[in-house]
Amino acid sequence: MKSLIPAVYFSVAVAVVAVIAARPSGPFVLVVTSPAAHAAGSMAVIDRADGAFVWAGRVPWMSVAYSQAPD
């Protein structure tokens, strides 16, 4: 059962990314990094993109960031 949990999280993350990519509508972005990178990985990605951290949920490798830059 424990080996199934990462696959479920990965599937959910891919589905969420697909939905968001299909309809970008604002300056908020879902940031998905490697689960092995922990919260530091997400923060590093957000920092390199000149974004601002907004929210994180139960898993540290998925968070929401804010940026005014369109790219």
Image (cartoon, helix red, strand yellow):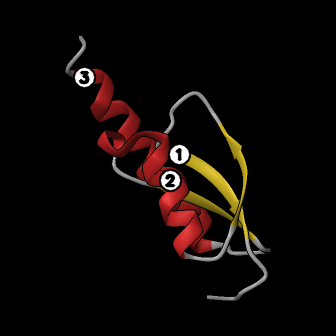
> Splitting the image into 4 quarters, where does residue 33 fall?
bottom left
Q: Are marks 1 and 3 in contact (CB under 8 Å)?
A: no
Tell me how far mark 2 sits from mark 3, CA to CA: 23 Å
- Label 3 is placed on what type of residue? Leu
Question: Dot 2, how many residues are within 10 Å of its Cα: few (below 14), some (14-19), or many (20+)?
Answer: many
Q: Is residue 3 left or right of residue 48?
A: left
C-alpha separation, residue under disc 1 versus residue under disc 3: 18 Å
The disc placed on residue 62 is 1
Residue at position x 32%, y 23% from top?
A: 5
Tell me what residue is drawn at x 63 percent, y 34 percent: 57
Q: Secondary structure at mark 3?
A: helix
- Which label's residue is closer to the chain start, 2 or 3? 3
Q: Position of residue 37 (x, y in %)?
A: 35, 45
Amino acid type assigned to the residue bearing label 1 in the image: Met
Q: Residue at x 61, y 64 (%)?
A: 20
Residue bearing mark 3: 4
SS class of the residue under badge 2? helix
The quarter of the displayed image where residue 53 is located: bottom right
Q: Is residue 54 above or below residue 56?
A: below
Position of 67 compared to 18: left or right?
right
Q: Position of residue 39 (x, y in %)?
A: 49, 42
Q: Label 2 vs label 1: CA separation?
A: 7 Å
* Cβ–Cβ under 8 Å for marks 2 and 3: no
Mark 1 or mark 3: name the one nearer the start of the chain: 3
Q: Secondary structure at mark 1?
A: strand
Q: Residue at x 28, y 34 (%)?
A: 7
Height in image: 53 above or below 36? Answer: below
Badge nearest the viewer, 1 or 3: 1
Q: Quadrant of the N terminus?
A: top left
For the residues bearing labels 2 and 1, Cβ distance under 8 angstroms: yes
Q: Amino acid at mark 2?
A: Ser
Which residue position is annotated with label 2? 42
